[in-house]
Image (cartoon, helix red, strand yellow):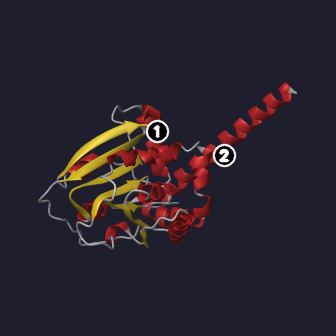
Amino acid sequence: MNGKRQRDKKWWWIVGLAAGALTVGLLAWLRRRTHRRTIQRRFWNPVYDRLAHWYDGVDWFTGNTTHRWRRSALRYLPPAGSRVLEIGFGSGKLHTEMARQHRMAGLDLAPGMVHLTRRRLAARGLSSRLAVGSVYALPWPAESFDAVVSTFAFSTFPDAEAALDEMVRVTRPGGRVIIVDAGEASDGNRVAHLLARLWELMGDYMRDEVPLMEARGLAVEREEYGPWNAVHTVVGAKQIGIAPRHHSSIISK
């Protein structure tokens, strides 16, 4: 009996590795022939929307590891009662948690995620101003929020500068822009580098947010964690007297 289990386990490993290799190969083939913006728009964005109700399964499959990484943003939030905007809130787990203490607003590209998050909030007697839209044209006035949060979404934005300009624009002086995402580790380890290349094959953009924030006059701190330091939190504090920057062109995510 034990021998049969060992053989079954071996075959599952073989099937899993083969499926993984096939997936990576397909992504590499697509990447060579398709621009990353096209991959995002035609493939990942529709999948992201249609799988809204299954999205929490990713956290379950990883033992809630991904959500624990998202929660690292919480310790950088302003005091309770502050106005907080979350961009790319997904299924709304972190958004709901923040709504218990803060006056929330949120924006997501996917109508399915907005619907799911509204239901999650309503079931707990919480509220938030949620909108479907683009990070490149946030539907809020300048200096509206004490903090702007984005977890595992910034790396999906093709135009990082236009996205960050909008995030900084709606942040009040003294407020913070908080980004949690995957990327290269500062120690240059090869595993984190390989993981970053895999994310890029799937259409994401691995970038260092620190110089982007510093170029906009933010005071920046960075923290790394997770396996091989492949996940990071970057926090930029908006200084008083920073004028908003505007981009002449806006592209769709």
Q: Are marks 1 and 2 in contact (CB under 8 Å)?
A: no
Classify residue 230 by image quadrant. Answer: top left
Circle 2 is placed at which residue position? 19
The relative height of residue 160 versus residue 227 in the rendered view (above or below) is below
Q: Which residue is at a point 26% across and 72% down the rendered structure image?
A: 141
Sequence-first disc among 1 and 2: 2
Residue at the disc numbered 1: 194
Q: CA distance from mark 1 to mark 2?
A: 18 Å
Q: Is residue 171 above or below residue 184?
A: below
Q: Secondary structure at mark 1?
A: helix
Q: In the image shown, does 9 or 129 lie closer to the viewer? A: 129
Q: Could you tell me the amino acid type at mark 2?
A: Ala
Give the amino acid type for the residue marked by disc 1 in the picture: Leu
Q: Is residue 20 left or right of residue 181?
A: right
Q: Which mark is residue 23?
A: none
* Residue at 22%, 61% in the rendered image: 172
- Relative horizontal placement of residue 51, taking residue 193 as reference (left or right): right
Q: Residue 153, image x and y in percent?
A: 42, 56
| Residue 158 visible in this rendered orientation of the protein | no
